[in-house]
């Protein structure tokens, strides 16, 4: 595989991982909205990791390596948050991140299959 193709596959993964890292470094994301705050924060976990899952599937080309790499990153993200004042690394959040990864992988596969079906017509 040419270097330019590897860069085009992996640069978006790296950039999105940097966005997640940057968000994880923010000391407190509380909005003060009570239950809605919790829902918004957990929804953000799913959304961030759905994007990562889709990008990882695009880069790896296979589901299991994409999922395993994403789960590994989610684990390191929670460790990172453990050291950020006002944040905590939680195994539950890594589980929520994993749900996001699965959603992103499935959505990317679905979109790819639809595109292939349209092109085959």
Image (tube, rainbow, N blue to C red):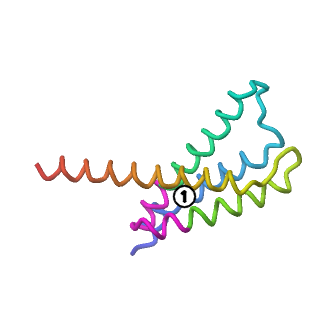
| Quarter of the image with the N terminus in it | bottom left
- Label 1 residue SS: helix
Q: Residue furthest bottom?
A: 1
Q: Residue furthest left?
A: 121
- The magenta stretch spans residue 59: yes
Of 43 and 118, which appears nearest the observer?
43
Residue 98 locus on image (x, y percent)? 57, 56
Identify the residue at horizontal 42%, vertical 65% (top origin): 63
Q: Main secondary structure of the magenta part?
A: helix
Query: Mark 1: few, some, or many residues within 10 Å (few <14, many ≥20)?
Result: many
Residue 20 in the image: state x and y as whole percent: 66, 50
Q: Position of residue 59 (x, y in %)?
A: 45, 64
Q: Quadrant of residue 28?
A: top right
Q: Position of residue 40 (x, y in %)?
A: 65, 33
Residue located at (35% from left, 54% from top): 109
Q: Does residue 22 lie above or below 14 as drawn?
A: above
For the image shown, how many numbered marks are present on the structure?
1
Horizontal relation, residue 74 to residue 30: left or right: left
Query: Which stretch is magenta?
Result: 54-68
Q: Residue at x 68, y 38 (%)?
A: 41
- Residue tagged 1: 13
Q: Residue at x 54, y 52 (%)?
A: 99
Q: Quadrant of residue 60?
A: bottom left
Closer-to-camera residue (91/52): 91
- The outermost residue toward the top is 33
**In the figure, is residue 27 to the left or right of 94?**
right
């Amino acid at each position: 595989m040419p270097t330019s193709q590897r860069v085009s596959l992996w640069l978006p993964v790296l950039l999105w991982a940097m966005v997640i890292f940057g968000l994880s470094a923010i000391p407190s994301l509380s909005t003060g909205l009570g239950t809605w705050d919790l829902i918004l924060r957990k929804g953000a976990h799913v959304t961030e990791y759905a994007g990562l899952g889709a990008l990882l599937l695009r880069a790896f080309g296979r589901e299991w390596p994409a999922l395993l790499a994403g789960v590994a990153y989610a684990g390191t993200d929670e460790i990172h948050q453990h050291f950020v004042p006002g944040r905590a690394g939680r195994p539950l959040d890594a589980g929520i991140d994993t749900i996001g990864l699965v959603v992103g992988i499935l959505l990317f596969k679905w979109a790819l299959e639809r595109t292939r079906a349209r092109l085959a017509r």
